[in-house]
Every structure is written in C-alpha cells, then in structure tokens.
Amino acid sequence: MPPEHPALDRVPIAVDLDGTLLRTDSLIESIFVMARTKPLSLFRLPVWWVGGAAGFKRHLAATAMPDVHLLPHHDELLAFLDEQKNIGRPLILATAADEKLAREVGRDVGLFDEILASDGHTALRGKHKRDRLVAEWGLKGFDYIGSGVRDYPVWCAARRALLVSPSRHLEHKVAKVTPVERVFREPEARWRDYLHALRPHHWVKSFLVFMPLAMAHRLFEAELSLRASLAFVAFSLCASGQYLLNDLLDLPADRRDPRKRERRLASGRIKLAYTLLLMPLILIAAFAIALHLSIGVAGVLALYLLLMIAYSMKLKDIPIVDALVLAGGYALRVAAGAVAVNIGVSPWLLTFCVFLFFSLALIKRYAELVAKESTPGPAHVRGYFGGDKVVLVAQGIASGYLAVLVLALYTNTEISRHFYARPDFIWGICLALLYWVSYLWMMATRGRIHDDPVIFALSDRMSLCTIGFAALFSLLAL
C-alpha cells in the first residue's frame, strides 16, 4: 500500500540491476562482449570461477564490459524512480554485479545516490545484500525493488516490496512477508518470440540440400527425398542455433542499428539465460539428425557451424572475406544434400552456387550500407564504408553474371546432355537468371532491399515470376 503522504516519504529505495532496472543480464552480456573482442580470454573463465562468484565478476569486469549506454532498461520503472528522486527519496543501486559495472550503469542512469555491489570478495546477492542494506538503513528501513527468487531474503527485511515482472508464485510468496506496493509488469515473452529469434524464415535457404537430388532427376524417390528432408531439418536447426549465437555476440551492434535494435534479444524481450539453454539443445538435435544420416553429413554440418562461428566472431568484420564465407555457407548446404543422398556433387553446380551466392552476400552488405546512410554519422557497416558501395556493385554484378556464364557453359557439356533431353532450353534459365541478378542489384541501389536478398525475393512479385519462368524452362529441358 502506498504511503498516505508520498511527498513526505524519505525512506530509501534499493533497486536491483539485472532483470530489474535492466531488461537483460549484465554478466552474460559481459561474457559475450569478451568472446567477441578477446576470445582467447574465454579459456580463463574456469580459472576465474574457481575463485568464487565475486572474484569471477571482478576479473570479467576488468577484461570486458558491455556498453552501458546501449543496455535496455525497464522504462516504466525508470520513470517511477525519476519521480521518487524528484520528491527527495534516496535511491540505492544494490546489485550482485561487479562494482565497476554497477558504477558505470549508475553514472549512465544518473539517479542513484549510492552504489552497493560485489567487491571482488563478496557477491552482493541474497542474504549478503539483505545484511548490507539492513546494516546501513535498519530492518524495515528501506523499500526494495527486485525481480527474482534470490531477492526474497531482501524483501523479507524491507518495509515495502516492489516487484518487476515476477511469477505469480513469487508475488504471492513475497506478499505474505512484506506489503507489496507495486508490481511493474513487462509483456511476457511467448513461444512466438523465441521462435522469431530462431529466424524460421531463413530456413528457406536450407532447401538447397535438395538441389543435388533435383539436378540428378531423382527428387521423387521416396527414400532419397526422406534423407534430403532430414538433412534440411538438420541444417535449419543448426542455422537457427548459429543465429542465436550470432545475435548474442552482436548485441551492441544490433542496438546501434535502428531496425535490429528491436530484435528479441537486443531489446531484452527474451531472457539471455533461456537463450543459452535453447541454443545447445537445438544444436544437439541438429547433429543427432545429421549423425543418423551419416558421419559425412555430420562432418559437413560441423564444418558449416565452425565456419559460421568464425564468421560471427571475426570474419564478418573483414571486407569481402565475410561475403565469401556466406557464399561458402550456401555451398555447404548443397554439399550436405549430396552427401545425404550419396550423389556426387557436380563441380559445375558448386561453382555456380559460389558465384551466385557471393553476389547475393554483397547485396546484403550493400543494402546495409544504404540503410546506414539514413542514420546520423558516417555510413559504416562491419568493414565497409560508404565509399565502398561502387566497388560492391561492380563486384556483385560481375559475380552474378559469372554465375550466368557458368550455367551457359554447362548447357554445352556432356553432363547436361546426359541429364536433359533438350538442354538448349537451359538458355531460358540463363536469361531468367541474368534478369534476376540485374533486377536485384537495381532494387538494392534504389534502397528497396533492406537486409537479406533471399528473404526479399520471397515477398517480391517480380522475383517470384522470374523463379516461375526459370522453373518452366527447367521442365521443358527435361
């Protein structure tokens, strides 16, 4: 129950940090900042952990910290604290996070009169936090705002309790020992939010595993189609697990982007701890399916995952190399499909895929540069600058046209005559591809493509018509 005269209330308010003031976990964020900036330091984590939680956080804070200006806050709680500050109530940030990080957050928020945090020897959580607050302000001499079960001992010693997005069970439990003044509720993350973080719309790229089967004209053989379908599921799950890792490593960059800042992880809509549980489960399922198919499929999948991890941690910041890696990821999908159904993959097909998908990867970077130009400051995306757009256009169009050339040369080979009764109709596919590559780059220069060109093509009428046109000529060539 609120006080009768709020303007006269001078009882201090102690506020927890992770999951309360912040819609994220600063410890997990710090670990992934370190993984992105100083990956070799990850090997020190077990050694630091042996020294206890407080020492672990102290070492971590000294090595890497998230940019506190970008961390997502609970806006309603922040507005409430601002109101309380204006009426003269002392505000205390009381957190189990390391003191260095806590002080950075305190300076950024600019509301707190005192910072209580872990000091490298004692982790300020649970009973330790309760004892520290009672020692300074007395039993029932402060109000406390928290969000988790670990805050229960502190609420027991507080005058009043304020809770942020608690479970119903925790809310009732706290109400039995301390009057609950207010509950701040954030929209709860639903299963759709976690599904969205897995980016299922990108699973369409994994249909490339069916390409070797289709090129061999054996797509309707039930057993082989089933094996290719399992390879599709394995690659889709592996890609989703990798997307989660990429988003965890990219949290600071995503929060600087006007569109990506609304992603589920960057905005704090879903919990980082739950994501850390979900990611290995997805990857285990992916490799279990791959191993069921064969060691070879699991090997291709492992190579893809290692390549994408290297991409997420470092290679994405190296111009041109990042696009080559993305193109290689597409080619590995084709290779996995070939291994799954035990069909030799044609070097013509792999060469075609590398050139085409290198062009599409460059479109992605070009589109990001165009989007960056609409925001304040210099246009800079990964290792690319605004002046690189001309080079990206030249390289991307050339690579796309080389893919058309490879396909055109393929029409005059013995392989094409073996698989196609009328290979001359493949020239119709060449014309469709030539148009599509040119069209995509034109849309990119007009600012119509905002991120991934493959996702753009699936919702673009002209792209779908072109794909249909190419499919028609494929049938005529049979």
Image (tube, grey):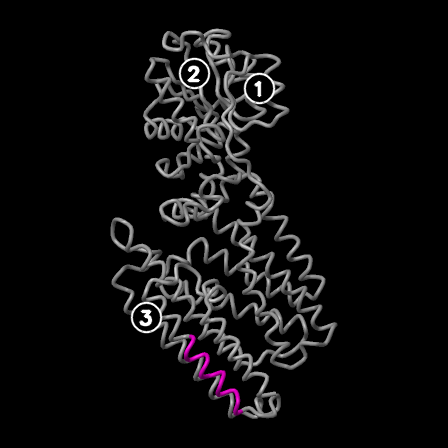
The answer to which of marks 3 and 1 sits earlier in the sequence is 1
Vertical order, 405 against 236 (above or below): below
Vertical order, 16 against 425 (above or below): above
Q: Is residue 40 visible?
A: no
Magenta stretch bounds: 424-436
Q: Amino acid at mark 3?
A: Val
Q: Residue at x 40, y 7 (%)?
A: 5
Q: Position of residue 199 (x, y in %)?
A: 53, 54
Vertical order, 335 against 239 (above or below): below
Vertical order, 361 against 282 (above or below): below
Reading the image, the residue beneath label 1 is 152
* Res 9 → quadrant: top left
Viewer-proximal residue among 317 and 50: 317
Q: Amino acid at mark 1?
A: Tyr
| Local secondary structure at mark 3 | helix
Q: Amino acid at mark 2?
A: Ile
The answer to which of marks 2 and 1 sits earlier in the sequence is 2
Reading the image, the residue beneath label 3 is 393
Q: Position of residue 6 (x, y in %)?
A: 40, 10
Q: Is residue 432 magenta?
A: yes
The answer to which of marks 3 and 2 sits earlier in the sequence is 2
Other residues around mark 2 within 10 Å, as few (<14) / some (14–19) / many (≥20): many
> Which residue sits furthest right?
223
Reading the image, the residue beneath label 2 is 13
Q: Main secondary structure of the magenta part?
A: helix
Give the Cα distance between marks 3 and 2: 57 Å
Q: Quadrant of the C terminus?
A: bottom right
Other residues around mark 1 within 10 Å, as few (<14) / some (14–19) / many (≥20): many
Q: Are marks 2 and 1 in contact (CB under 8 Å)?
A: no
Give the Cα distance between marks 2 and 1: 16 Å
Q: Residue at x 56, y 83 (%)?
A: 474
